[in-house]
Amino acid sequence: MQLYNTLSAEERAQLIDEAGKDRLTLSFYAYAKIEDPKKFRDELFIAWNALDALGRIYVAHEGINAQMSIPADHFEDFRNTLEAYDFMKGIRLNVAVEQDNHSFLKLTIKVRHKIVADGLNDDTFDVTNKGIHLKAQEFNNLLEDPNTIVVDFRNHYESEVGHFEGAITPDVENFRESLPIINEQLQDFKEDKNLLMYCTGGIRCEKASAYFKHQGFKNVYQLEGGIIEYTRQIKEEGIKSKFIGKNFVFDHRLGERITEDIISQCHQCGKPCDNHTNCSNDACHLLFIQCDECKAAMENCCSTECHEIIHLPVEEQVQLRKGLQVGNKVFRKGKSDALKFKKSGDLPDAPLAKAETKNIRKKISVKKVLIGKAEHYYSKSKIGQFLMENRELSVGDRVLVSGPTTGDQELTITEIFANGGPCETARKGDQITFEIPFRIRLSDKLYKIVQPSE
């Protein structure tokens, strides 16, 4: 009885190419009570291995979480293997926006304590008592409601390249970090606000919605099927996308393009970019954003140190790696002093104040005109850098800096530097800097506040 892979990733890729058949990348999850996860795991491996199904799957007493690659001509047979279990009858399969026959090259099914690590030890918490599911248009409608707070329950390296308009994007490296942070920030809004949440495929916000109901929040909603299903629906129904940028995915593609907006930048040179890569140094494997020019110059490395290491003899590299294989301390997700332009993942100087949270979807009584976007924040000197995209900005003008985490912050311009020199008026195309007493982020926009008649 085969319960393991017999082929390497390279051998599997070659067989896929030789077969010349299309494969489907998909994901699904289900919360359910599984008495014997190991037995369940073995049954799945035998059934799926026979269908040439590949992927990364976690099973636990609380359910199953799967990201997979399935031969297109075996799709119905695969669905039948799911229908054999009562809790997966009629389960929704999220088919990827972009297909790649090499998205997964091994079948890995692991038994875990939980399918989504949450850090909770509360026997009274019922993960099946979830929030209200919303389809794409319903989600868009509630997103427009000024009484709504929307939260991204993904990690910082996911939300950095794409997120919904107006969303709170916590600076966390895993789901369990986000629960207490958001719970603390939103304590004042349990009764009167709509708490709207989303993630990639729905599994994290499904648990989050149950958690916040358990914490006493009254109006809890979640995006059905996550960003993946949302994208499918907006394409099929011609709905305007409220998600901007790219959806991070956990296979070798590392992202699916949703809109043409690029809201992040190369962590090495600052050029607009939203392509993730893993550092080529096997002792690092840092996940970070890198443009094509830096990729070529640095040979996929995150730092000059790593670049030097990959050119050492293999034996020396192995010696340098000894003792370093300690899980997440090696495979970090975009947090490194070597990344000069990694700003959106920085922790703010202080937690979001409750007043700022209220301002996330604040209605401005005066007219505001978009004139630029944030590029950088020099924290030591408290200087913000923006690219002017529209109109002019002069000393004495009132501006609004607005973003998902920054909220809405107003200030008066007392001094401007354009393209490196002082000036009285900056114009479209100028790269400007001015003193700003709060941290800005790459997702922030710069608005000029004008009289309604202007």
Image (spheres, rainbow, N blue to C red):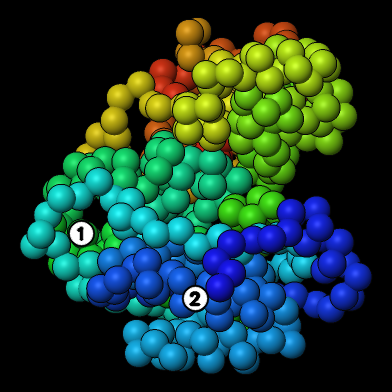
Rounded to the nearest angstrom, the CA distance separating label 2 from label 1 is 32 Å
The answer to which quarter of the image holds residue 35 is bottom left
Residue beneath disc 1 = 212
In-image side of 125 versus 35 (left or right): left
Closer to the camera in the image, 401 or 87: 87
In-image side of 50 versus 192 (left or right): right
Residue beneath disc 2 = 44
Pinpoint residue 447: horizontal percent, then vertical percent: 54, 39
Closer to the camera in the image, 46 or 78: 46
Dots 2 and 1: beta carbons under 8 Å?
A: no
Closer to the camera in the image, 262 or 416: 262
In-image side of 269 versus 188 (left or right): right
Q: Nearer the viewer, mark 2 or mark 1?
A: 2
Residue occupying image coordinates x 78% and y 21%: 314
Q: Amino acid at mark 2?
A: Leu
**Label 1 neighbourhood size at 10 Å, few (<14), some (14-19), many (20+)?**
many
Q: Earlier in the sequence, mark 2 or mark 1?
A: 2
Pinpoint residue 308: horizontal percent, then vertical percent: 78, 13
Closer to the camera in the image, 322 or 377: 322
Give SS at disc 1.
Answer: helix
Q: Quadrant of the N terminus?
A: bottom right
**Label 2 neighbourhood size at 10 Å, few (<14), some (14-19), many (20+)?**
some
Pinpoint residue 81: horizontal percent, then vertical percent: 52, 87
Q: Which mark is residue 99?
A: none
The answer to which quarter of the image holds residue 406 is top left
Pinpoint residue 56: horizontal percent, then vertical percent: 55, 60
Q: Residue furthest front?
A: 1
Q: Amino acid at mark 1?
A: Phe
Residue occupying image coordinates x 26% and y 40%: 181
Give SS at disc 2.
Answer: helix
The answer to which quarter of the image holds residue 15 is bottom right
